[in-house]
Image: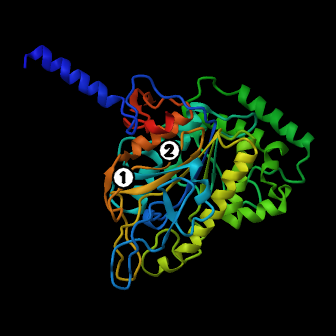
Amino acid sequence: MQRREFLKTATAAAAAASITSSGPLLGSSPVQGKAEHVISIWLGGGMGAMDTFDPKRLGDPARKVAGSYYPAIDTCVSGVQVCEHLKRMAPLMDRVTAVRTVNHHVIDEHAAATNFMHTGRPVSGTVVYPSVGSIVAHERGAAGEGVPPYVLIGYPNVTRGPGFLGAKDSYLYLTDTSRGPAGLSRPASMSPERQSRREATLAMLREAQDPRLQKLHQDYEETIELSLKLSGPRFNRSFQLDQEPADLRTRYGGEFGQRCLLARRLVERGVRFIEVSHNLNFLNGTGWDAHNEGILQQHTLIQELDSAVSTLLLDLEEKKLLDKTLVIITTEFGRPPEFDAGGGRGHQGSAFTCVLAGGGLNHCGAYGETDEIAKQVASNPVSVADFFATIHAALGVDYTKSLYDGDRPVPITDGGTPIAQLFS
């Protein structure tokens, strides 16, 4: 074959590979979705895919036979099954895509993997990378007036933070849905007149400052400004869950369910990105980190996830918000099919499931395949960077651009590309 013919053939083959409908999208122009909000549900500890959204043959912990802990049930999507404890999610899987082939090679240790699944990168000694929530806040800002762009419902952690982006792209957090964020609720003794006098005094102090403030001071000023807006009654009414119908609150369930309900209320008020943590209510004693005896009551966690998330999806749909709101379920890694000495499971990053729902995506129930015991990826692998690029694309964020740590360019997703099938 002559050199010219070889180059022509190779170019055609590359072009054909780039337009495959099942793999990551490799087109020249970035995909632009139409979602406006994200509700990110974090399952700290490590959700086992084969015990939830990627069931396989049944195992036997007593005889140390690798496999699923629970039987599988059919869903509304032909050929897609889930574990028997996801019975409320099963009829909703046409609004959902369980991405079964997420994988990473970060050490299977909780802190390192949690950082990776929030920032998309390993811990660095030279750069503090921003979380996906902070990047969305930075790129899109709040969707409403007088609300923060990013709210964390759970305990604060540096892995959720803004990194080099600065405090203005950080989160507002609360740990208890019975009241609003600490420090934002104005005391009863603080009259509107007294508040106005304080704000006038603050304005005078600002005028006396050097206008050439350092970036740290500027970030602090912006944080104060946002805090003043958030302390008003309009935003604080978001946390009055007793305004919701009692039967709806019951369907959502306990504290985790109330967090999901609060997330929906925050979406209505214009918050762009909300992370809801499901790792403090250890119904089984260990949470999703189901080593040893922790697996015996793992089904209670799965059932709580099932009732809360299924209610959230239907609630968003009823309020015409599901296509505008991307709901994601992530975890730091999965669990292996083998059982440990105590009958539970260890850690596995080679193949695990993260879930996408709503957000205007073309859902298919499940994407990608693992082997017969969910140990390895069999087809359509999805890197963490690809998964994050899919989130950004759904929100209309340019996943190909770079952010800057000073004058150092940092790609938003470390080279990730979205899952093409979800946008076709």
Identify residue for label 1. Answer: 103
Q: Residue furthest left?
A: 1
Q: List x then y, in percent, for residue 9.
A: 19, 21
Check residue 194 in the rendering and tell me which mark sits there, or answer none: none
**84 is higher (above) or lower (below) than 406:** below
Q: Looking at the image, can residue 128 be seen?
A: no
Give 108 or 406, whichever is nearer the viewer. 108
Q: Is residue 347 left or right of residue 283?
A: left
Q: Amino acid at mark 1?
A: Asn
Check residue 131 in the rendering and tell me which mark sits there, or answer none: 2
Q: List x then y, in percent, for residue 406.
A: 43, 29
Give 288 or 225, whichever is nearer the viewer. 288
Figure colour scheme: rainbow
Q: Amino acid at mark 2?
A: Ser
Q: Is residue 56 left or right of residue 274?
A: left
* Residue sitting at x 87%, y 37%: 196
Q: Is residue 97 left or right of residue 60?
A: right
* Residue sitting at x 44%, y 23%: 29
Q: List x then y, in percent, for residue 273.
A: 62, 43
Give 215 or 204, whichever is nearer the viewer. 215
